[in-house]
């Protein structure tokens, strides 16, 4: 019983605390970058929301909302909306299409 109280329970409590912190970190990351999973299907209001999130999160890197919005809209225009074929295989998913179009 002493082992359970003095060792096991503090380890479990520490583990739970760390998992909550990680969950919050991944949630924050997802809020900022989840738009990349459906990049080609973004609507104008989604682009506005994304630009606001990015400029608030990274003010040193993104100082001009209008410029970033224009860059995103231009980038989206280069992404094919239909299914792309790469090496004879159909490529599904926006992220993969982006990689394929720009040969990354």
Image (tube, rainbow, N blue to C red):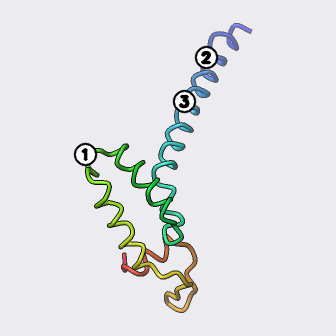
Q: Give the Cα distance between marks 1 and 2.
A: 40 Å
Secondary structure of residue under mark 3 = helix
In this image, 103 relative to 12: left or right? left
From the viewer's perspective, is the residue at label 1 or at label 2 nearer? 1
Q: Earlier in the sequence, mark 3 or mark 1?
A: 3
Q: Which residue is mark 2?
A: 10
Determine which quarter of the picture holds residue 4. Answer: top right
Q: Which residue extends farthest bottom?
A: 88
Between residue 61 and residue 99, name the one nearer to us.
61
Q: Residue at x 26, y 50 (%)?
A: 63
Q: Which residue is mark 3?
A: 18
Between residue 60 and residue 9, name the one nearer to us.
60
Quarter of the image with the N terminus is: top right
Count of marks, rendered view: 3
Between residue 86 and residue 6, name the one nearer to us.
86
In this image, 80 relative to 54: left or right? right
In this image, 1 relative to 12: left or right? right
Determine which quarter of the picture holds residue 3. Answer: top right
Q: Give the Cα distance between marks 3 and 1.
A: 29 Å
Q: Position of residue 14 (x, y in %)?
A: 57, 23
Q: Which residue is mark 1?
A: 60
Q: Position of residue 91 (x, y in %)?
A: 55, 81
Q: Position of residue 42 (x, y in %)?
A: 51, 66
In this image, 26 relative to 62: left or right? right
Are dots 2 and 3 in contact, CB under 8 Å?
Answer: no
Between residue 53 and residue 15, name the one nearer to us.
53
Determine which quarter of the picture holds residue 12. Answer: top right
Q: Which residue extends farthest right?
A: 1
From the viewer's perspective, is the residue at label 2 or at label 3 nearer? 3
Q: Give the Cα distance between marks 2 and 3.
A: 12 Å
């Amino acid at each position: 019983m002493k082992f359970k109280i003095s060792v096991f329970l503090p380890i479990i409590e520490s583990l739970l605390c760390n998992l909550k912190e990680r969950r919050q970190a991944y949630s924050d990351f997802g809020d900022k970058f989840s738009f990349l999973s459906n990049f080609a299907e973004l609507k104008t209001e989604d682009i506005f929301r994304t630009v606001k999130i990015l400029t608030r999160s990274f003010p040193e890197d993104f100082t001009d909302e209008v410029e970033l919005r224009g860059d995103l809209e231009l980038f989206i225009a280069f992404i094919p909306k239909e299914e792309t074929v790469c090496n004879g295989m159909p490529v599904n998913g926006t992220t993969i299409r982006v990689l394929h179009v720009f040969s990354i």
